[in-house]
Amino acid sequence: AHLLHPAAAPLARQAFGPYVENSLAAIQHSISSPDAGQPKFMSATENAISALNRYLAVTTPSPANSESASGDASYASVDAGTKANHAQLYPLWLSRLPLTHDRVEARQCHDRLVWACTPNSGCPSEVVTYLLGGNASPGQHDSQRVAHVMKVLAVAMSYGSGELISATHFEGAKTLLVAFAKVLPPDVLQATHASLSDEKAQKVLVDAAQA
């Protein structure tokens, strides 16, 4: 879902450019509203989170939509204003996951999260840092950020392959959970498990910790 045809991405950026700031402000307002999590607004909130995901996809180069196989090399050409937006918006986007109501949009967001957090996926290291804090090296991220990613993936995976995570990324999500469980401090891992109210999601996390 994060991939764009090489010819489409520049055109999308050009067409969207004049409306970026107003659109992003509206999206941020929508998903940051105190009422955003209420059931009657959940559909609109998830639509806004998905729109933010599409903006991040269009403005973040990856090997699939760039001639370079290196995400860092591609990201070097991104302008400073867009990078400043990314530094603010990637953590905001992550904080509003998981999505559970619209399964198509959920798969798009969760697949992108798996791609971004997977080592050697082509995701720029700056973006990994925006998401996970610390630096881009495994085991040197912010433990609370990693814990939240684990919670998102555990919830999404608890619905089964192809539901809230595509079958293509499901095994990658499982691999990430196992890897993160090995480096997360035990007390943080325990707190993450305790924060999950769904038994199926708890089991996903336990299985990863015991793998």
Image: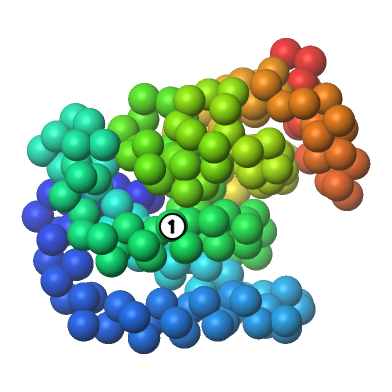
Image vertical order of residue 97 relative to residue 52, above or below: above
Foreground: 123 or 152?
123
Q: Please state the horizontal and vertical placement of residue 182, each as a whole percent of the image.
A: 69, 18
- What residue is drawn where x is 52% and y is 67%? 49
Can I make out residue 59 in this image? yes
Seen in the image, is 173 located left or right of residue 66?
Answer: right
Q: Please state the horizontal and vertical placement of residue 164, each as a whole percent of the image.
A: 59, 49
Foreground: 180 or 141?
141
Q: Please state the horizontal and vertical placement of residue 145, each as a whole percent of the image.
A: 64, 44
Can I make out residue 203 in this image? no
- What residue is drawn where x is 36% and y is 62%? 84
Instruction: Name the residue beneath numbered marker 1.
Output: 87
How many numbered marks have been drawn onto this rendered protein structure?
Answer: 1
Q: Please state the horizontal and vertical placement of residue 169, each as a whole percent of the image.
A: 48, 34
Q: Residue furthest top?
A: 211
Element class at badge 1 = helix
- What residue is drawn where x is 77% and y is 21%? 209
Q: Local crowd at mark 1 within 10 Å, few (<14), some, or many (≥20)?
A: some
Seen in the image, is 67 located left or right of residue 65?
Answer: left
